[in-house]
Amino acid sequence: MTLPAPEPAAASGEETGLVPAALAVTGVSHSYGRRKVLNDVSFDVRPASFCVLLGLNGAGKSTLFSLITRLYAVQEGQIHIFGFDVNRTPSEALRRLGVVFQARTLDLDLTAGQNLSYHAALHGISRQEARLRAASVLEQVGMAGRTSDKVRTLSGGQMRRVEIARALLHRPRLLLLDEPTVGLDVKARADILKHVRSLVAEAEISVLWATHLIDEVARGDDVVLLHEGRILDRGNAAEIADRAGVPDISAAFKRLTGVAGEGGT
Amino acid sequence: MRPAVTARPIPRRAGFGLIQYARCFGGIVWREALRFWNQRERFVSALVRPLVWLFIFAAGFRTVLGVSIIPPYDTYVLYEVYITPGLIAMIELFSGMQSSLSMVYDREMGNMRSLLVSPFPRWFLLTSKLLAGTAVSLAQVYAFLAIAYFWEIEPPSLWGYLTVLPALILAGLMLGALGMLLSSLIKQLENFAGIMNFVIFPMFFASSALYPLWRVKEGSPWLAFICELNPFTHAVELIRFAFYEEINFLALAVVLGAAIVFLAGAIAAYDPSRGLLTRREGP
């Protein structure tokens, strides 16, 4: 399937005076040795929008996240965050980015507050300011009373909330979440999804939500459908379903990939 | 997909200033100190190892291994006095390898990612982490020296405790940088035991830590040659001379050079565009 390239403004809009895409991925390919895991991937995330990166396990979502966060260097193609090239101006790009990785990245032996203070320092934020911001973001995610608790004592859902709070601490404009609800119960999943959606509506944060769970996609969401390292389709969930000639995104996923998608319940 | 533009201007932020760099560095040191505090048994075990060598091994071998007058000593010294700089370097060696183990553990647990996605330059983050690890090893060394003082192992004057500090920092940086470089080569935590066999023991035993090089030369010129090439030998000698308020310039040059090479190697290894981690699906 041939897909249209992202809008030119999405790649670098700074010089036009308009705000560029929150995230612009253009022609990105990546290989581990001879094994190609991403093949000419292009899409963008609009500012203040909720975009779902939908794909099965092994589709290439985590590799793409590692490229966006510059854990890996981009081998082919370009990635821009609000117009800043991740490879050329990593500092500017990463300052605008908050990340929740699939694997837990909190230090279990530190308290929730200490984890947030450490993160603040990694962004050059003063300790006093960090304390104020930590109290605020922990309250936002419903963890205000657990600041002094060791992370080890928290449940999986609570750890995720702390990770989201940490990702928001330096006030990013783009939030990446890689399978953030995996391993959580139904209520914790719903709460986290609801909270992140509220960030888009209330704080105008752009979100790229990577998941393999189709029931996390709402009808109005932007969706990037990734399968075996290639983008099969992208656009509004309802539009993708229409293009595939099926009633919903779940059926579209099955038609495009040949595999039934997973729900989370 | 809809056009990716809005009318809201994005605020451009100023680059990081010195204060922000200082905050970042302070945060990394603070986190290492917290981890160290949370693992106090690590501190005790790091002290027990050299003390066993000092109180049992050295005491037992005192009469067997004679040490002739060699610089920086201007008289005969007890064997315990001779091996103390080697044991200090051993503390720093184990501390450096412990940092390496922590980095591999952090990588497996995912903590490493939170460090590496910081907007500060990666060389700065890694160097800060290295300095933080060295600071922790200094606390261990001075605790060991405090105990050794009561065993009548002390520098010629109290200034020795101060003059040895730069040597300890430099040796700690070199060994920590080596640990950092090794951590980039180790894929899994389970492989760390190999480090013990292939790095720590050969480095320690093929050095001047336990016996002077002239003695080694008598037994095996080849082994003495290997010992001379070993940067750990020079770390030991740098500390030995500094403890006696002297400078061993050859040792200083080797330790400084090795520290730079190891750190540059570690930074390159953790560089996303050149590093080993990218090629094998890390970090």
Image (cartoon, coloured by chain):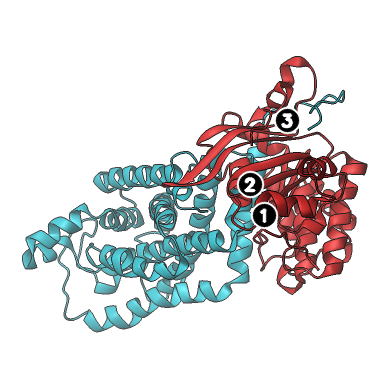
Q: Residue furthest right?
A: A202
Left or right side of A97 for A185: right
What residue sits right under mark 2 in the picture?
Answer: A65
Query: Toward which corner of the image does residue B209 lie, by quadrant?
Result: bottom left
Placement of B107 over or under B12, stated as above or below: below
Q: List the residue tagged with mark 1.
A: A101
Q: Which residue is mark 3?
A: A82
Q: Amino acid at mark 1?
A: Phe
| Quadrant, the C terminus of chain A | bottom right
Give the amino acid at mark 3.
Answer: Phe
Instruction: Name chain A's colour.
Output: red
Residue visible at 21% across and 59% down in the picture: B74
Secondary structure, mark 1, is loop
State which tag comes first along the sequence, 1 or 2: 2
N-term mark: 3 or 1: 3
Q: Amino acid at mark 2?
A: Phe
Residue at the image position 43 percent from the left and 78 percent from the top: B48
Q: Is residue A126 left or right of residue B269?
A: right
> In 3D space, how far apart are the residues under numbered discs 1 and 2 (Cα atoms)?
8 Å
Horizontal side of residue B246 vs B63, given as left or right: right
Chain letter for the cyan part: B
For disc 3, the neighbor class at 10 Å (few under 14, some 14 to 19, many from 20) is many
- On the same chain, marks 1 and 2? The answer is yes
Quarter holding residue A150: bottom right
| Mark 2 surroundings: few (<14), some (14-19) or many (≥20) residues within 10 A | many
Q: Residue at x 81, y 49 (%)?
A: A246
Say which of marks 2 and 3 sits in front.
Answer: 2
